Every structure is written in C-alpha cells, then in structure tokens.
C-alpha cells in the first residue's frame, strides 16, 4: 500500500476503497475483544441516534442490506444489547431500541473508534479536515455523470 497505483498516483476510487478497507480493519481489531463487528457497531450507533427505528430504516441508515440487519438485530437481541417492541400503530413493524447493556457496549465501542477517528485527523488543519469532509460527502451524494 502507498506505492505505485496504490499510492498518490492511483485511481481515486481505488484509493477510497483502500482507505475504507484499512479503516475497517482498524475498527475490527479495536472492537474484537468486545465481540462487536463494524456492521454491529454501525447498527448500535444508528439505534442510539434514531431510537425506535424499524429494521428497514436501520438498513438504509447503516448502509447494510435488510438481510444483514435482520441477522445483526437478532444477534444483538440474543446478547441483550437491544429490545424490540411492536410499533404503536403498525403492529407488524417492530421498533428497536438499545437496552442498558447495549448503551454500555456502544459507549465502550465509541471510545475505541473515536481514538481511530482522532488518528485519521492527525496532521490535518481544521480547514483541511473540513474540506476533506465536504469532499467525501460530495462523493457520496453526487450523481454519476
């Protein structure tokens, strides 16, 4: 990594994938002893941000397939990290919330991931970090030509 086409002269798309893969690997290692995967961390994070969310909405927000979210939710429920209850008006929809165990688990995960996030921004000025964040959002939200 970091040389030839895997370095600064590489294709932007490949470099984005390479960086995302490296980030994911760091997060996997940081959360391994907590027995939490990056997709599970994403689901826990979205549940904290959007309490009572449905599986379908959770899949969209966490950038995961509905099938993957169903498996993650079942595993997190078995571990006591989340609770499900029927929607007040739509009986077939299950609302999902973090349990106290889930909140504690998420707090432990966040502490570790925030360290990785801080490391990502090391050496960047506020302006550079802001420009990078804007560029990443633009990449994610702009329609292909």
Image (tube, rainbow, N blue to C red):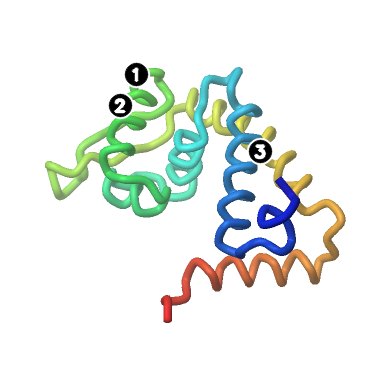
* Residue 84 vertical placement versus 144 (above, below): above
Q: Residues within 10 Å of mark 1 (few under 14, many from 20)?
A: few
Q: Is residue 46 left or right of residue 56?
A: right
> Residue at point 74% right, 61% down?
8
> Residue at point 27% right, 49% down?
56
**Which numbered disc flags the more N-terminal residue, 3 or 1?**
1
Disc 3 and disc 2: Cα gap in Å? 23 Å
Q: Position of residue 28 (x, y in %)?
A: 58, 30
Q: Which residue is mark 1?
A: 78
Q: Residues within 10 Å of mark 2 (few under 14, many from 20)?
A: some
Q: Is residue 107 left or right of residue 35?
A: right
Q: Is residue 40 left or right of residue 14?
A: left
Q: Which residue is mark 3?
A: 113
Q: Secondary structure at mark 2?
A: helix
Q: Position of residue 108 (x, y in %)?
A: 63, 28
Q: Among all residues in the image, which is located at the extreme left? A: 91
Q: Position of residue 18 (x, y in %)?
A: 61, 49
> Residue at point 32% right, 37% down?
68
Q: Secondary structure at mark 1?
A: helix
Q: Secondary structure at mark 3?
A: helix
Mark 2–mark 1 CB contact (< 8 Å): yes
Disc 3 and disc 1: Cα gap in Å? 24 Å
Q: Residues within 10 Å of mark 3 (few under 14, many from 20)?
A: many
Residue in front for this viewpoint, 89 or 139: 139
Mark 3–mark 2 CB contact (< 8 Å): no
Quarter holding the C terminus is bottom left
**Which numbered disc flags the more N-terminal residue, 3 or 2?**
2
Query: Disc 3 vs disc 1: which is toward the camera?
Result: 3
Q: Which residue is mark 2?
A: 74
Disc 2 and disc 1: Cα gap in Å? 6 Å
């Amino acid at each position: 990594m970091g040389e030839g086409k895997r370095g600064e002269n590489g294709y932007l798309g490949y470099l984005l994938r390479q960086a995302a893969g490296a980030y994911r690997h760091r997060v996997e290692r940081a959360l391994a002893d907590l027995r939490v995967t990056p997709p599970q961390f994403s689901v826990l994070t979205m549940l904290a941000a959007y309490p009572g969310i449905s599986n379908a909405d959770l899949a969209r927000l966490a950038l995961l397939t509905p099938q993957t979210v169903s498996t993650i939710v079942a595993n997190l429920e078995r571990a006591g990290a989340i609770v499900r209850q029927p929607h007040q008006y739509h009986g077939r929809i299950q609302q999902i919330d973090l349990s106290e165990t889930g909140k504690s688990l998420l707090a432990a995960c966040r502490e570790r991931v925030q360290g990785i996030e801080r490391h990502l921004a090391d050496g960047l000025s506020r302006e550079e970090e802001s420009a990078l964040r804007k560029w990443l959002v633009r990449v994610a939200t702009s329609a292909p030509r």
